[in-house]
Image: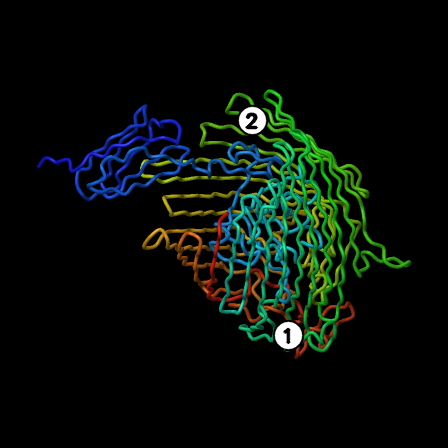
Amino acid sequence: MTQQSWAQITGRITDGEQAIAGATIYLPEENKGTLSQLDGGFSIELSSNRSRELVVSYVGFLPKKIKLSSSKQKLGTLVLEADTSLEEVIISGNLKPVNRLESTIPVEVYSPAFLQQNPSPNLFEGIQFINGIRPQINCSVCNTGDIHINGLEGPYTFVLIDGMPIVSSLASVYGLNGIPTGMIEKVEIIKGPAGTLYGSQAVGGLINVITKLPEYSPRFFSDIYGTSWQEFNADLGFSASLGEKVNSLTGINGFVYDQPIDNNNDNFTDVTQQKRFSIFQKFAWQSTTERKGSLALRYLYEDRWGGELDWTPEYRGGDEIYGESIYTNRFELIGQQTLSSAWEMQYSFTQHQQNSVYGDTFFEADEKIGFLQAIWRKEKGKNNWLGGLSTRYNWYDDNTPATQSEQGTRPNQYWLPGVFLENEISLKEQHKFLLGLRLDHHPNHGIISTPRLGYKINFDPQTLLRFNLGTGFRVVNIFTEDHAALTGARDLVIEEALDPEQSYNVNINFYKKLYTSSGWILGFETAAWHTQFSNQILPDYDSNPNEIRYANLDGRAVSQGLSANLEAVFGAFRANIGASFLDVFTEEGNEKTRPVFTEKWSATWAISLPLFNENTQLDYTGNLYGPMRLPLLGDRDPRAEYSPVWSLQNLKLSIVKDNNMRFFVGIKNLLNWTPAKNNPFLIARANDPFDRGLSYDANGDILPTDNNPNALSFDPTYIYAPNQGRRFFIGLNYTLSQ
């Protein structure tokens, strides 16, 4: 039987100004398609009345879906919208806005929509579903944490806000929990050293938090939600125009969790209690095209505690009931001003004050960091020059021997000036070379150089290969980086004067984007890396279970591996799926050791799909981690030496009303996984947190007794995953546009 034509559909494809030739016009129900002509025109026949949708796609533009009917045969002009994911603007790789695909340095970009797939009160929790990134909780009692990149410890991760190095040292212990997701415009991540542009600490990678721009922010926005564990988080903000040239943005965040829960029955809080408040104020101005600037201020206060369930503030610092209580006051100032087309000034100042007790151990610290940087840019022919002068002032004081002398307190303070220069050379349209060098002068270690080399080749506009070599260095502050030295019974032992760590890294990155005739957009990214350290400093938990020992490694330390990411977009459906395989070890003499808290493999996913209609969305996020070695207190410790395979998974259902209101409900930790499962206990000697019932031999080692058959001391450092079970949440987003 001859198939009859039911209708003929005609139209014309443009980008709003010019005709698009070669665009794909596709009928999914009939699996047939055609291409637009030189004038953008097309015609396609429907073979039956089953076809109800037509999809138009073209490289570099978002696919467009058209609903069909028998009365709608002439579609007229169809305007395709540019695919902004191809035009993502990044800053972190070259200190200036550039197209993501044009950057020689691979930079990953994550939008607020990605962070909102699993509602989180802070950045620390919000990025746990990014491939190669793992937030690590380091204490079961106070929940201090850091962020691992590609298996490297948290101190190797450099966290910036608007490009300013203000989250480091003391602030990295609890400060990551104080960055609310409501103030974030996007998050940029570089995996691998970035010391050429950012100096000390950018060894394993960096996370640059870009805050919202006042001129493009909604007039009012709010994000409020609560959980069945009685956690409550609120982000509120509003923007205003202060005349023709100045705009302002105000953001307020509050988080409260004040309900002690002890599901593992050890008489200790499963999760730290927190009360946190922050206010963020940003101004942006522009006097001419070349002269514009911004100034942001933020204040944070946090009161957190964890410990025995009957602890109250009256026991703070005493030896009757164990508790860890931390008061944090933090102030930040961040600014930048363009002086001309070639010059820009950046500056920041932060003060972080911590008043804390760990049982009957007091720890009080004050840190001030000032930063000033002048940046110079010049494009000439095939050369794109970038240079800069910077200086960083660190002032740190605490009540430990680190800053004490016979004459009294002796704050640790130093200037760290630096200079950098790099040139990105374009050869034809396919090839780019990057050559860069930074010199920093440290008062104790002299001049330290960090060069980098990059190469990028574009096989076509959507296929590219990057190759990068780089170095990094880091000066270690033990007292602010290892909270385990303050909690429990382990003594801190520094065996020698510690030299700065240095690293050497090579990585290869391949990226490919595909557009299918059926309307799918697929992005593939794979990477391989090798990082080798000299003078690496790692905590040694194994030599003596009563000590944490520090020394420069007399050998080598290596982090190497492979990662792969897949992005898929089809209409309202979006998926980000990734996997990483890590080989991390230290080698000293003939002994090869894998560090604690380092997984061999991991996987992450974040999937969004419409349900019923485009106003209803389901988000499914999760991660999966392979076994990692854990710190034990000796051969008699009954806890597992390696963690099992574990996973955190979440569901979120959103309903949009009137395009400005979103109601959502969901489940966090769907599988109800906690690290206390399949272990006799999580906190060692939770029944004796002040170690009163211990017996020692002549060497100071703990003896097994009837009350302590496993020869353990109080120790809360055995934790590798959040100790918070399944909980439900409900919330509301509201946005009032400009």
Where is residue 313 shown, x and y percent of the image? Answer: 69, 74
Give the residue at x 40% y 55%.
656
**Between residues 24 and 465, which one lies in front from this camera angle?**
24
Q: Residue furthest right?
A: 407
Q: Is residue 648 above or below residue 55?
A: below
- Image quarter where the N terminus lies is top left
Does dot 1 land on a helix, a strand or a loop? loop
Residue at image point 48% right, 43% down: 564
**Residue 360 is at least partly visible in this image:** yes
Horizontal relation, residue 153 to residue 13: left or right: right
| Res. 432 mark | 2
> Is residue 422 among what the camera can see?
no
Amino acid carrying mark 2 in the image = Lys
Residue under numbered circle 1: 308
Distance of mark 2 from mark 1, alpha carbons? 59 Å
Question: How is the rendered protein coloured?
Answer: rainbow
Task: Return the x and y of residue 189 as percentages of the image width and height.
Answer: 57, 44
- Give the quadrant of residue 35: top left
Q: Position of residue 636 (x, y in %)?
A: 63, 68
The correct choice, above or below, for 236 with respect to 343 in the image is below
The three-letter amino acid code for the residue at tag 1 is Glu
